[in-house]
Image (spheres, rainbow, N blue to C red):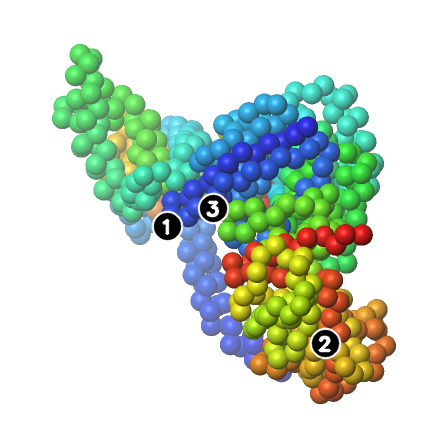
Amino acid sequence: MKRSITRLLMAPSVILLLAWMIIPLSMTIYFSTIEFSLYNPDQNGFVGWENFEFFITDPAFMPAVANTLILLLSVLFITVVFGVMLSALIDKPFYGQGIVRVLLISPFFIMPTVNALIWKNMMMNPVYGIFAWISTSFGLEPIDWLSNHPLMSIIMMVSWQWLPFAILVFVTALQSQDTEQKEAAQMDGATGLHIFRYLTIPHLARPIAVVVMIETIFLLAVFAEILVSTNGGPGYDSTNLTYLIYNQALLQFDVGTASAGGLLAVVLANIVAFFLIRAVGKNLTV
Amino acid sequence: MSYLTITELQKHYDNYHALRGINLSITEGEFLVFVGPSGCGKSTLLRTIAGLESSTGGTIELDGRDITELASSKRDLAMVFQSYALYPHMTVADNLSFALRLAKVPDAEIKEKVRSVSASLQLDPLLDRKPKELSGGQRQRVAIGRAIVRQPKVFLFDEPLSNLDAALRVQMRLELARLHKKLGTTMIYVTHDQIEAMTLADRVVILNAGQIEQVGTPLELYRQPNSRFVAEFIGTPKMNLIPANKAALQDNNLAIDLLGNQIDFPANRLKESLSASTIVGIRPEHMTLVEQDGDIQGRIELVEHLGSEAYAHIQLGNDQTIIVKAPARSELKDGQDVSINIDVQEIILFNENDRVISVIPEEA
């Protein structure tokens, strides 16, 4: 009796959450098996695997997968490495520590579109961007970042956006590091580098795993920065899977193929998650 | 020959003077205990010796070398922390060998040293465990082992037993005493527990408000405290302190008027004269309860039976309460009127500055 009441009371939220997930998923699966182009909305016969085949054989597909992975791994690497170093740097008290911390964390509060616009127009613009000004003041040719190094530009923007998140997590973690352990290591003859290597890094293993997993979720779906700055170009040089799906659905109006791409992205995300969790997740159980 | 010499050591924090000119010399192989109430500077002194705090004046010399400005990693001291501070992600074996590995000691030698330390501290079955899989007592032993394995010049202990339960504390105290006998290394030990201080120390340093109050063997401190602070701090239950309201010279004896009761004290042995603010100190075991005609009279407020002995809290006039040690099976009842004899030889007198009034030793 008591159990059934519990179930009854929980049912609305469970059903709602289930529907929230199941309905879009099943609709995507359904769309991926029919012909569904917004140019020809009347024709929607069953086509089997044709949409998947079409998406995979698209010349943009392999570059998009590669770009997605390069973007993900580069940003993870940059945010974790620089995040750990910067957090260790600002962990010790110094004059102005509070302001420096706020400044380091503030990029996280800027929305991705604005972030991309700032970088595109104020930093990377080959005529009046800051990078161009730096280059010309040394007598060098300014670099047209978005045309010549599109993926690198995206990586810079996204790293700038996500580094604060890593710093926020690591700074908090460092504050919980036991000072007596560090002192014990000092007495044992450890230098600052030894302490960093043998105490701080192992202490940060779990926060690093958390940052990697959370960032992976968001970095597989980077979109706004690409749309605002490079539009996936030139060619497919900065197209990732998310952008390719958007391209199929809303630029080529092919909902069927886009749905197939969406499902492939889910599969890719699961593969990446599997390896990442295997690699860093064991730290979570310690 | 002094092994560790501390001269005029000062430590200022921003607005707090933590160490006010500490002078101390420690001989090699000595077990020295710093004891004092919280905030007296005993931990600061230990941490300054360790190099974890920088001093703001004075010098520290170890084995003929000035180490005042030396980094703690180069001082050749080992410290056992209150929280043990074991490295949480290393096994016990790795914890023990950490310092040796940093010092690039050859592997075979590390193995041998770890093996002998772990055997002597019964850590062998634990070598592959992580610190969080150990009990408090085991962690304590690992922390001590980590210090021993380096064979430092001096061991520093910062309240190492305060996180253990009472039974384990007694056992570890004994193990530490044995360890000191076996190793013969100089040890400095900080505690606020005067029983630890009394049982472990060759010499005890009593600190108060950043200054050394008295240094001496445990029994010296117990028998000949040189201030009221030391007298009150050492001994459980505390020494009884009773104001002597009037003092008058009668013949060659000084009659101290103790709450209306008069006791006689041989005045020719005193180095200074008494005043109305003189405090009479007498330990509980130096008084005896008698049927009648004792030196002072009182009423039993409460009796604490400890099994091997009993402590009677006795109310004198003027709300003054004193504690008197009584035989274990005494039939004392609350509210009973009692008479107390005082062993005059054991009385310690304190002047108005809370310093002891010296007594010329009796000629034998």
Disc 3 chain ID: B
Q: Amino acid at mark 1?
A: Asn
Residue in view at x 62 percent, y 35 percent = B25
Q: Position of residue A171 (x, y in %)?
A: 43, 43
Tag 2 residue: B295
Q: Quadrant of residue A159?
A: top left
Disc 2 chain ID: B
Q: Position of residue B298 (x, y in %)?
A: 69, 82
Q: Residue furthest right?
A: B329
Tag 1 residue: A44
Relative vertical location of residue B110 with respect to residue B208 in this rendering, above or below: above
Residue B115 appears anywhere in the view: yes
Q: Earlier in the sequence, mark 2 or mark 3?
A: 3
The residue lying toward the viewer, choosing from B29 and A60, is B29
Residue in view at x 70 percent, y 78 percent = B296
Label 3: element kind: strand
Tag 3 residue: B18
The residue lying toward the viewer, choosing from A196 and A6, is A196
Q: Residue furthest left?
A: A128
Residue in view at x 30 percent, y 50 percent = A41
Q: Amino acid at mark 2?
A: Asp
Single out the mark in the foreground, 3 or 1.
3
Relative vertical location of residue B206 with respect to residue A140 in this rendering, above or below: below
Q: Amino acid at mark 3?
A: Ala
Q: Residue furthest top?
A: A139
Position of B118 with respect to A260 (left or right) is right
